[in-house]
Image (tube, rainbow, N blue to C red):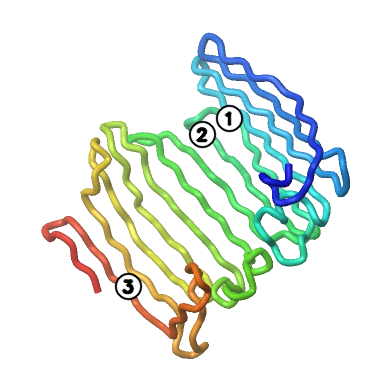
Amino acid sequence: GEPVFGQAATLTTEGFATLEGGELDTELAIRRLDDPGGSLTLQASFSNRTRQLALDLALSEPEGGVVASMLDIEGRPAIDMTLAGAGPLEDLDIAFDLAANDRSLARGEVALRESDDGLAFSADFTGELSPLIPADYRDFFAGESSVRVAGVNLAAGGLRLDEIAVAAEALDLDGSLETGPDRFLRRLALTGRVGSEENGPVTLPVPGGETTLRSGTLDVSYGEGDRWRGD
């Protein structure tokens, strides 16, 4: 396991998957047998006939586990993550939760809803991600961060994102976009702020860890009468 996980690990895997007559049913259980232990379990099913989806994913690892090591998280904390929901595709909520050392770091929900234009969806996530971020970039993600995306997978073809919103200590982005049935971009609007004059320069989360920015703004648009415009 060391070439894959960055550490030696002895794992056992049990499970099954069936796909027949438009019905999917799967179960998977991966357990680490050597210290420090840990487990990943998955139960998922979907029926084309009823449009019912059920998902239950759970990861639990003590300190020094595979996930913390693969992601090079400082201190190699215990990691617990769940992703679960059940219901028809047209009215489905899936909840997400991530914790490190029993401290909730991120939580959120993905929702699917039937609409006149197609299958509407939204994703909302909030959390304090800095404990999971390398020290060089931690100021960029300080405090609570949030992400919201809402849109529609259009029945006529294409995708419409009515809301794209990202907020963090050193970042604010708001936008929307739409594609045609061919998935090519038809419209885009994006505005934002990076950094702030009050807090001084921050290290941007780009390779090298040496690119800093005190503050900047972004204003990009495409479509609706003009071609590309950016400031």
User: Tag 2's secondary structure?
Assistant: strand
Residue bearing mark 3: 218
Kindly identify the amino acid type of the residue bearing the numbered disc 3.
Answer: Leu
Few, some or many C-alpha atoms within 10 Å of disc 2 (few <14, some 14-19, many ≥20)?
Answer: some
Residue 105 x %, y %: 68, 61
* Residue depth check, mark 2 versus mark 3: number of the one nearer the observer: 3
Badges 1 and 2: C-beta atoms under 8 Å apart?
Answer: yes
Q: Is 155 placed above or below 50 here?
A: below
- Answer with the quarter of the image where residue 121 lies: top left
User: Tag 3's secondary structure?
Assistant: strand
- Answer with the quarter of the image where residue 110 lies: top right
Residue bearing mark 2: 91
Q: Is 49 placed above or below 83 here?
A: above
Residue 100 x %, y %: 75, 59
Badges 3 and 1: C-beta atoms under 8 Å apart?
Answer: no
User: Tag 1's secondary structure?
Assistant: strand
Residue bearing mark 1: 87
**Residue visible at 39% across and 75% down?**
193
Q: From this viewpoint, which residue is outermost toward the top?
A: 21
* Residue depth check, mark 3 versus mark 1: number of the one nearer the observer: 3
Kindly identify the amino acid type of the residue bearing the numbered disc 1.
Answer: Gly
Few, some or many C-alpha atoms within 10 Å of disc 1 (few <14, some 14-19, many ≥20)?
Answer: some
**Residue visible at 56% across and 10% down?**
20
